Amino acid sequence: MAGLIVVTVLVVQFGGVVVARHRAQAAADLAALAAAGSAEYGPTAACDAARTVAGRVNVAVRECHFTDWDAVVSAAAAVPFGLFSDRAVVAVARAGPADP
């Protein structure tokens, strides 16, 4: 019985980490698109737009910068519960104009 409980806890923990990873990646993607869409107003305004978008889904932007015309955003989401709840998962996304 104890083995079944341990396996169940581990599966739930793994699920929480996977959910946090997907949240972080989705938020990074949206934040990078927001930054790229606001690039014409300068990098500060663009990164503020990225932070606003990520903040709406409770994800923190760790880094935001531009490489040429591409916005590169790193976002971190907290693992929601359990043994790893004091940890965060990080995702990186890049958005910019398409190559001709």
Image (cartoon, rainbow, N blue to C red):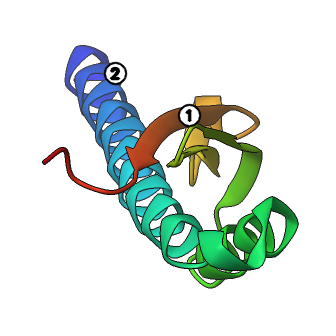
Which is more toward the observer, 32 or 81?
A: 32
Q: Which residue has dot 1 on it?
A: 89
**Disc 1 to disc 2, C-alpha distance:** 23 Å
Q: Quadrant of residue 18?
A: top left
As drawn, the label of residue 19 is none
Q: Residues within 10 Å of mark 2 (few under 14, many from 20)?
A: few
Q: Is residue 42 left or right of residue 17?
A: right
Q: Residue extending furthest left?
A: 100
Q: Residues within 10 Å of mark 1 (few under 14, many from 20)?
A: some
Which is more toward the observer, 69 or 11?
A: 69
Q: Secondary structure at mark 2?
A: helix
> In the image, residue 4 lies at what x, y percent?
20, 24
Residue flagged by tag 1: what amino acid is it? Val
**Image position of 29 with respect to 68: above or below:** below
Q: Which residue has dot 2 on it?
A: 6
Query: In what quadrant of the picture does the N terminus appear?
Result: top left
> In the image, residue 32 lies at what x, y percent?
49, 59
Q: Residue at x 41, y 58 (%)?
A: 23
Q: Earlier in the sequence, mark 1 or mark 2?
A: 2
Q: Residue at x 48, y 50 (%)?
A: 24
Q: Residue at x 39, y 48 (%)?
A: 25
